[in-house]
Image: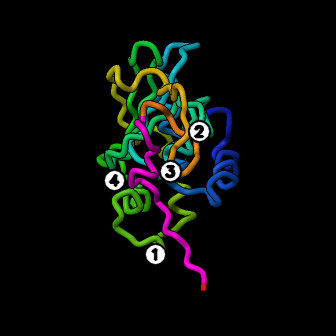
Amino acid sequence: MNIGPHTFAEFARRAAELHSYPAPGLLVGGYMVEAARRRLPPGALFEALVETPKCLPDAVQLLTPCSLGNGRLKILDLGRYALTLFDKYTGAGWRAGLDPSRLFDFSEYHAWFMKIKPKAEQDEARLLAEIEAAGDAVCRLTPVRVPERFLGHDRQGPVRICPDCGESFPVRDGERCRACRGGDPYLPLTTA
């Protein structure tokens, strides 16, 4: 079974180029993306909501026009390996998630997904073969409607210069940038 226009091997190569190796989660994600996309009306302008930051967003970005950069990919970390493709105006779409009850015929796939075996003990060749053999048959697909708060893009709006650091930031954030209000992730370097 192809993943979009790609054979499994072609998609695995594309995944490795983006992700540094053909991560099983990214390959599984390819089947999930395509299963949801096939259920959307032809020509629908859609966006994506992904329920984990791990691997799955990369599958969305490889196979759809949705990306973090263009605002059409949103990540809501619910800790679930699932995604939804939805009409950007109405929110109507399809949620695709892995159904653990459908993995029992694929022992290595099941062990990987349920984290039964440490990565060092997994048979990678067998795992990839089982992912390819299962295709999207292990997906649970559900029609959904995404709430209005996820529709459309988050527009930045006007900017101002922070009086503390001198960098620009959105006016909506207040008088000082978020970093200078305690959100800066960096520690100062000390010199000897």
Residue 61's disc number: 2
Q: Nearer the viewer, residue 63 or 108?
A: 63
Res. 63 image quadrant: top right
The residue pinned by badge 4 equals 104
**Label 4 is placed on what type of residue?**
Phe
- Of pointers 3 and 2, the one earlier in the residue sequence: 2
Q: Is residue 47 above or below residue 81?
A: above
Q: Which residues are magenta?
A: 173-191
Q: Is residue 121 above or below residue 131?
A: below
Q: CA distance from mark 1 to mark 2?
A: 30 Å
Query: What residue appears at the point 41 percent right and 53 percent down from the top-left corner?
Result: 183
Residue 173's disc number: none
Disc 4, SS = loop
Query: What residue appears at the point 54 percent right and 65 percent down from the top-left corner?
Result: 124
Query: What residue appears at the point 48 percent right and 75 percent down from the top-left corner?
Result: 120
The residue pinned by badge 3 equals 164
Q: Is residue 143 visible?
A: no
Instruction: Let me know if residue 179 is in the magenta part.
Output: yes
